[in-house]
Amino acid sequence: MYTLDDIRRRLVGQRLTNDRLQEMGISPHSKGKWGEANERLLGLERNNLPLPDLGEDGELKTAVVDHRGEFRESLAVCMDTQDPLKKLAKTILVVARDLKPGAAFAEREVENIDVLLLHPSPLLVAALEADVALLQADRKARETYFLELRTKGRGAGPKRYAYYIKKSRLKEYVSSVLRATEFQALRDTLQGRRIGPADLAAAGYSPRDKGALGKYVHRLAGSGSWILRTAVVTGDGRYREALLVTRGSGDPVAALQRLALVRIEPLAE
């Protein structure tokens, strides 16, 4: 049994070269060669991954990005008889970077660069539920945002449909999952923390400095993709000042999508 951190430690940085594939007995022509290689590196049987706390539906998938960070293909989620939201909540994605983007498929090699759980945030859940409703009404619906239904497999047998995250939206989905994960860690770090004059002084900030609280909170939060803003509220919950969203010619809508607000309540007026 592996935790997400265990999988990340074992896989990130691993180069899946053709020599390594050959050592594993994996054909360089196989469409699922990198996913199979990652399962082998974890010591797991193909398509039988005992992921922790994810149950029988837990699954490991591998997706490749090019040198610009764009995904090369859409991502198969599950068959149309399954719930894609439940499946995504139990899917671990290994992101690999293409090391030979101009080469033929059989000659390409990749390096694992990240591992993440695709569990959708509340915002993603709303978008996915809307997509599922549209696709259940019409398999060829074009108004969906993240999901699409396509036939899966080859051969002359009956058509089987599966849910996919569109290639054009996969990067956005992954980025949203990462931001939600980062936000939760940020919230765990800051929520409920008490900050006094002694804390500010120990960090080298003067309690008389108007921006000392904000600077201290930024220091606690560390670097990240979120734009952090602090706002002090009065005892009755009113904000003392207007909130700075962006400066100059910046796009306020884009800024708000990445803005995390830290409400600071004084312990004594």
Image (spheres, grey):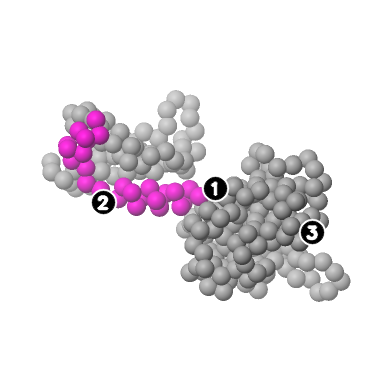
Q: Is residue 127 magenta?
A: no
Compared with 245, 55 (above or below) is below
Q: CA distance from mark 2 to mark 1?
A: 27 Å
**Residue at 25% over, 40% down:** 232
In x, y percent, where is residue 68?
A: 65, 38
What is the quadrant of residue 156 in the picture? bottom right
Q: Are marks 2 and 1 in contact (CB under 8 Å)?
A: no
Answer yes or no: is residue 97 visible: yes
Is disc 2 placed on a helix, strand or loop?
loop
Disc on res. 76: none
Q: CA distance from mark 3 to mark 2?
A: 54 Å
Q: CA distance from mark 3 to mark 1?
A: 32 Å
Residue designated by label 3 = 27
Residues packed near mark 2 inside 10 Å, few (<14), some (14 to 19) or many (20 plus): few
Residues packed near mark 3 inside 10 Å, few (<14), some (14 to 19) or many (20 plus): few
Mark earlier in primary sequence (3, 2): 3
Which residue type does callout 1 highlight?
Ser
User: 92 or 121: nearer the eye?
Assistant: 92
